[in-house]
Image (tube, helix red, strand yellow):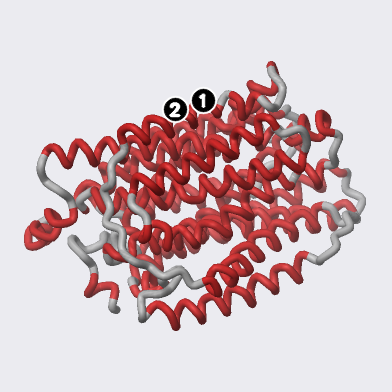
């Protein structure tokens, strides 16, 4: 495009041109991609292990669920702080910090004698995981010139799509032949290898600067993001298990989170003009970034809600087992990942709108189709629907990530990636809570009319998917408004 020409000097300044720097940058990004794949794989490999852990450790389902809840809660609390960390620390020390923490957590999990230590290990793992993705995103935005970012973000989407997709399948295979500890024992040497390779080969590619740490913001951030994620997750659990006693009602935790969020935002608005904010909200001065984040919010709600409901539907309505369900969802995840580089190259040529609009239309089409599922729905239709859904999401995620990060000033990259990560955590918790609540309430209502339990559950799932279809329409509207970021530093755009 001709409007790229005037900013050649700006692009050159943002990305070193000599071949030595280019080779160094490629190596750093490759190491970050591999390491992020490892930590993301670990995030979902546990999803099929809860029943085994309940039996092996002699614990209840609600206690075992803390392995997931504690992980998500830690991610929600740590991610907002990564904006500060990425400013204060250079690439090499923060990578070594993140992978060392993750490796330590994996070791703790592998040798855990009981559930309490296992949960502690998952919390330590989550701290390392929370740092890796913002580090990867910020590094890519710093090193890669605007005209090539789509391709690189496409490679990142492989990590984001394939690792979570193959995680449950790998976990199911391990549990079919080995005890649950092997899920961590097998990951441990890979994590150590990534750590040692990074220690030997990764180089500093960022320029740290002084960034003060506001402890009040850290406390408010933990109340806000932690309270909302935990409260929303607990709300879904409360609705699904109406008889389960809870010492604190979920709605009270959500209110604490909302109050914490209001106070956190208020404090950040006061601190950011002096460059002292923990999470700089000036990123939202970019209209394009705001639209992209809103689109990501809806996409993650829809995706996480669907990922939760599909296994419930396939196992409790259609009658598939856990391995069959994992295999059913595997092709979609692989397709989404394999499409990443192609979508990235198309983004570099065409921009986000021509990709995101068809993608959101496909997502809406599939969500609409899922509102008609029942006990007799053929498995091949579910497989085809999930693959088409994955294609649609592949057309959405890479353009949205690239356009959003490219729409803010360079010095705000770390904050922009931290906001994106925080929104993903909140959206995932909200999506799961919403879909599970709708499914449970509708199923109970239908069962009260005398409908058999399986048919009532199918009816509840259909209504929940209807909510996803409505949410998808908002994605279409946002996709129509998203634009390719201007080349160079969008300081002028950010001010409007």
Q: Quadrant of residue 198?
A: top left
Q: Specify the quadrant that holds the C terminus.
A: bottom left
Q: For label 2, count other residues whose C-alpha is less than 10 Å away and answer few (under 14), some (14-19) or many (20+).
A: some
Q: In the rendered view, does 372 fall on the left or right side of 237? A: left
Q: Nearer the viewer, residue 333 or 195?
A: 195
Say which residue appears at 71% left-offset and 39% top-offset: 118
Tag 2 near tag 1, CB within 8 Å: yes
Q: CA distance from mark 2 to mark 1?
A: 6 Å
Judge whether residue 396 can be spotted in this image. no
In this view of the protein, which residue sits in the foreground, 291 or 274? 274
Mark linked to residue 385: none
Residue on which disc 2 sits: 193
Judge whether 493 appears above or below 429 on screen: below
Residue placed under numbered mark 1 in the picture: 189
Secondary structure at numbered mark 1: helix
Q: Which element type, helix, strand or loop, lies under badge 2?
A: helix
Identity of the residue drawn at 82% across and 65% down: 248
Q: Where is residue 438 drawn, in percent x and y?
A: 73, 58
Q: Is residue 148 above or below residue 486?
A: above
Q: Is residue 130 left or right of residue 143?
A: right
User: In the figure, residue 185 lies in which quadrant?
Assistant: top right
What is the x, y in percent for residue 119?
70, 43
Q: Residue at x 53, y 43 (%)?
A: 101
Residue 350 visible: yes
Q: Position of residue 487 (x, y in %)?
A: 18, 60
Q: Is residue 424 above or below residue 104?
A: below
């Amino acid at each position: 495009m001709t409007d790229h020409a005037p900013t050649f000097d700006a692009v050159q300044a943002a990305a070193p041109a000599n071949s030595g720097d280019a080779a160094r940058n490629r190596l750093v990004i490759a190491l970050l991609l591999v390491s992020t794949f490892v930590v993301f794989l670990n995030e979902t490999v546990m999803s099929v292990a809860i029943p085994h852990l309940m039996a092996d450790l002699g614990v209840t389902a609600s206690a075992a669920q803390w392995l997931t809840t504690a992980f998500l809660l830690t991610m929600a609390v740590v991610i907002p702080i990564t904006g500060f960390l990425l400013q204060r620390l250079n690439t090499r020390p923060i990578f070594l910090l993140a992978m060392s923490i993750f490796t330590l957590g994996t070791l703790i999990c592998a040798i855990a004698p009981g559930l309490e230590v296992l949960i502690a290990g998952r919390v330590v793992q989550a701290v390392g995981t929370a740092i890796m993705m913002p580090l990867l995103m910020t590094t890519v935005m710093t090193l890669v010139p605007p005209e090539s970012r789509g391709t690189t973000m496409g490679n990142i989407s492989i990590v984001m799509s394939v690792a979570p997709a193959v995680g449950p399948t790998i976990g199911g295979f391990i549990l079919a032949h080995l005890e649950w500890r092997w899920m961590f024992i097998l990951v441990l040497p890979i994590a150590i290898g990534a750590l040692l390779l990074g220690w030997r080969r990764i180089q500093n590619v960022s320029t740290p600067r002084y960034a003060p740490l506001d402890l009040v913001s850290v406390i408010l951030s933990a109340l806000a993001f932690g309270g909302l994620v935990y409260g929303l997750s607990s709300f879904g659990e409360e609705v699904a298990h109406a008889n389960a006693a809870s010492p604190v009602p979920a709605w009270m935790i959500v209110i604490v989170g909302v109050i914490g969020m209001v106070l956190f935002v208020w404090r950040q608005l006061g601190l950011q003009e002096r460059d002292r904010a923990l999470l700089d909200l000036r990123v939202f001065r970019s209209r394009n970034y705001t639209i992209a984040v809103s689109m990501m919010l809806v996409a993650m709600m829809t995706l996480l809600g669907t990922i939760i409901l599909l296994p419930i539907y396939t196992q409790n309505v259609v009658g598939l087992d856990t391995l069959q369900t994992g295999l059913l969802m595997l092709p979609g995840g692989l397709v989404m990942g394999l499409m990443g580089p192609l979508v990235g190259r198309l983004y570099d040529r065409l921009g986000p709108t021509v990709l995101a609009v068809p993608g959101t239309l496909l997502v809406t089409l599939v969500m609409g189709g899922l509102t008609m599922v029942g006990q007799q729905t053929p498995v091949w239709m579910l497989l085809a629907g999930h693959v088409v859904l994955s294609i649609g999401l592949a057309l959405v995620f890479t353009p949205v990530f690239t356009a959003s990060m490219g729409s803010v000033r360079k010095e705000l990259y770390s904050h922009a990636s931290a906001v994106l990560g925080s929104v993903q955590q909140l959206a995932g918790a909200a999506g799961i809570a919403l879909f599970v609540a709708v499914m449970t309430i509708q199923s109970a209502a239908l069962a009260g009319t005398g409908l058999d339990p399986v048919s009532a559950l199918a009816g509840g799932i259909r209504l929940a998917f209807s909510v996803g279809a409505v949410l998808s329409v908002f994605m279409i509207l946002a996709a129509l408004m998203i634009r390719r970021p201007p080349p160079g530093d969008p300081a002028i755009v950010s001010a409007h």
